[in-house]
Each structure stands twice: as structure tokens, then as C-alpha cells.
């Protein structure tokens, strides 16, 4: 796929750090363990060898995934955005139907963190909010119906 991977600079740095940790720290240690286990006789009943090979495949798969995401990264710095509309990178405060106020930042798929209010730009909530202005009402489609939220603040930080 050649579609861009929209991401913030901290998100890209986190991907690079995970790649570095897997490639330079975890994988070499595991290769050493697998080599040691392979030298211990029958591999068909060697738990260290079997687990090690399985874990190596998982790491290699994750490294390929991370490499692809990093290669396709298109970094967007929210601080440079000047807009009165909600776009990627915006930090948005909304009030829902229960009169509760919530704040979300619209980020890349690799950066989501529900506890920190970081939602993917591809999520149903973000899709409902994109291109809205302060005062606009967003229709949010959920698995169990629909709800509304009113945009009360848009920031780029």
C-alpha cells in the first residue's frame, strides 16, 4: 500500500523507538537464545527453541509492519495548523447529550490512547467531528445507535 500514514512527530518517534528496541535489543538476545537451544539436541521437544522461533517470527512480522508505517509516515505538526475547523491534529472539546464535556486529540492510527483522549482520525467519532467548527453539532454513529456532540473548543497544540 502506498497510502500515507498520517502521524504526529511524537507518534513517529514512538514507532522508531519501538523498532529500535525490537531490532537492536530484543531480537539479538532472542537469536542468541534460539541458537543456544538449537544446540541442545532434539528440537521437536525443546520448549526454548520452539518458543524462541515463534517469538522471532512475531518480532520479524512486527518489524516489517513498523518499517512500512515509518516509511509511509507523513508527519503533521498540529502547532503549525491555522484553522477554524477540526482537522487532523486538532484537540477538540465537545459536550455530549448528557451535558458531559470531553476533550480528544485527533491523531494517527498508530497513536491512539483512550486514556489520554487520543483518537484515530479514522474512528467514527473523529469522522463525525472532522470539518466541524465551534458551535457545530456532530452526529456520532455508534454500534448501539446515534448520539450528538456539540463542539465547544478547537485547539492546535
Image: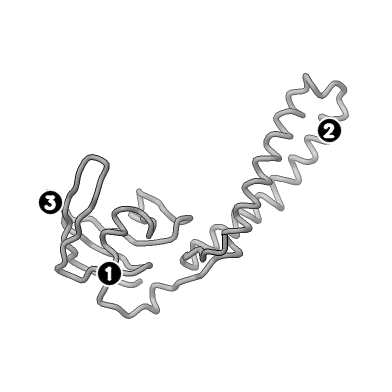
Q: Which mark is residue 117?
A: none
For label 3, the SS is: loop
In screen coordinates, is 141 left or right of 76? Answer: left
Eye-nearest disc, 1 or 3: 1
Q: Nearer the viewer, residue 111 or 123?
A: 123
Residue position marked by numbered label 1 in the rendering: 131
> Relative to 48, is 126 above or below?
below
Q: Earlier in the sequence, mark 3 or mark 2?
A: 2
Residue position for label 2: 36
Q: Nearer the viewer, mark 1 or mark 2?
A: 1
78 over 18 or under it: above or below:
below
Measuring from the top left, give residue 28's x and y in whole percent. 76, 46
Marks 1 and 2, how far apart at CA: 57 Å
Q: Is residue 79 left or right of residue 15?
A: left
Which quadrant would residue 43 be assigned to in this image? top right
- Mark 1 or mark 2: whose residue is earlier in sequence: 2
Q: Secondary structure at mark 1?
A: loop
Q: Nearer the viewer, residue 99 or 138?
A: 138
Q: Is residue 66 above or below residue 49?
A: below
Residue tagged 3: 97
Which residue, as the protein is rendered here, is positioned at the far front? 1
Amino acid at each position: 500500500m502506498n497510502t500515507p500514514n498520517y502521524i504526529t512527530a511524537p507518534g513517529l518517534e514512538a514507532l522508531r523507538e519501538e523498532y529500535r528496541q525490537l531490532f537492536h535489543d530484543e531480537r539479538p538476545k532472542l537469536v542468541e537464545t534460539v541458537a543456544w537451544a538449537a544446540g541442545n539436541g532434539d528440537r521437536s521437544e525443546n520448549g526454548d527453541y520452539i518458543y524462541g522461533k515463534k517469538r522471532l517470527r512475531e518480532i520479524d512480522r512486527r518489524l516489517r509492519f513498523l518499517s512500512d508505517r515509518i516509511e509511509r509516515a507523513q508527519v503533521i505538526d498540529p502547532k503549525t495548523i491555522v484553522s477554524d475547523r477540526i482537522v487532523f491534529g486538532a484537540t477538540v472539546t465537545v459536550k455530549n447529550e448528557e451535558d458531559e464535556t470531553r476533550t480528544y486529540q485527533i491523531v494517527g492510527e498508530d497513536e491512539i490512547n483512550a486514556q489520554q483522549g487520543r483518537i484515530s482520525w479514522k474512528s467514527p467519532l473523529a469522522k463525525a467531528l472532522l470539518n466541524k467548527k465551534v458551535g457545530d453539532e456532530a452526529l456520532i454513529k455508534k454500534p448501539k445507535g446515534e448520539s450528538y456532540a456539540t463542539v465547544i473548543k478547537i485547539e492546535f497544540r
